[in-house]
Image: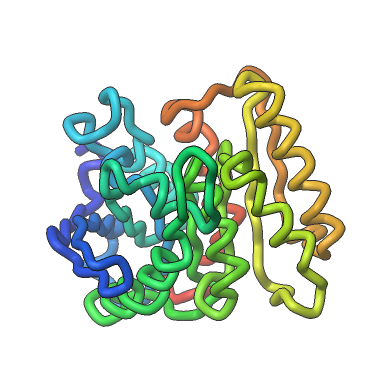
Amino acid sequence: MNRASQITKVTLPAVWSPQLRNRRAVDVYLPSSYDESRDRYPVLYMHDGQNLSDPATAFAGGTWGLLEVLADLADDGLEVIVVGIHHRGRDRITEYSPFADRRYGPGKGDRYVKFLASTLKPQIDRRFRTSRARDATAILGSSMGGLISLYALIKQPRVFGAAGAMSPAFWHGDRGIFNVIGDLRSPRRTPASRIYLDMGTEEGAVALRDARAMADGLERAGWGESLLWVEEPGGRHTEHDWSRRLGRAITFLLPFTAAGRA
């Protein structure tokens, strides 16, 4: 049997957000051991849920190959629950942006983050056997999803203990995320938080420059060994490239077995 086929995908078709006044589908990926175990599992929240595993719903048919990535991690002893939050089409950029942008207008990122922390996560915790510890709760995305993931970690440090920003769109909102990082001081962050940050060298000189600058800024803000910066030679801005790096990112962000045991 294909190992990836043993992962169960549960779709919650119409999750209501009182913060954004809209509904969206949410996919929950459960490990193959879920039904046979009483353990609680670490949880990874991922944006752009349409693109994670189904070519029929993915942008241009390209997916992250999430099922295969999770199967490989399970072989190495790491099983996680993944929550794939679908975006809202034309609202995607504004919902993933915490800043006003000259081209795209006001951002709804603060409301989106509150939806994740105050509405969606409690529902997931009630319905599934999740580890509710913050250090077993991570958030990850690419491009605009990478931007909002880092922002969510900073704004909701009691909820999210780790964040992955893959090929992040730090240009958005006049690079406003750099002001947020610049305002941080070590006492304001929880030492246990982890950040995974990456960029491919073929994603453009400006994007690569910004990602390198962010890695330096996070070092100065006190992350140190809690930061993993990956610069991938030849890496491009595609789901295929993010899939190739996803396993390493999850392993760094959630180094726990079921029930939160290190």
State the image coordinates of residue 199 (x, y, percent, origin top left): 64, 33
State the image coordinates of residue 82 (x, y, percent, origin top left): 36, 57
Drawn side of residue 95 relative to residue 143, left or right: left
Count of numbered marks: 0
Drawn side of residue 93 relative to residue 155, left or right: left
Q: How is the image coloured?
A: rainbow
Visible in this render: residue 262?
no
Visible in this render: residue 222?
yes
Residue 179 vs residue 232, the one in the foreground? 179
Residue 213 vs residue 57, the one in the foreground? 213
State the image coordinates of residue 189 (x, y, percent, origin top left): 72, 74
- The structure residue drawn at horizontal position 22% and vertical position 30%, both measured from the top left corner, is 55
- The structure residue drawn at horizontal position 42% and vertical position 42%, both measured from the top left corner, is 72
Quadrant location of the C terminus in the rendered image? bottom right
State the image coordinates of residue 182 (x, y, percent, origin top left): 79, 60
Residue 138 vs residue 111, the one in the foreground? 111
Residue 169 vs residue 142, the one in the foreground? 169
Figure check: 132 above or below 31:
below
Drawn side of residue 173 relative to residue 114, left or right: right
Question: Quarter-wise, where is residue 27 in the image?
Answer: bottom left
- The structure residue drawn at horizontal position 20% and vertical position 54%, both measured from the top left corner, is 8
- Farthest right residue in view: 220
Quadrant location of the N terminus in the rendered image? top left
Figure check: 242 above or below 99:
above
Question: Quarter-wise, where is residue 254 in the image?
Answer: bottom right
Figure check: 221 above or below 118:
above
- The structure residue drawn at horizontal position 76% and vertical position 47%, both measured from the top left corner, is 215
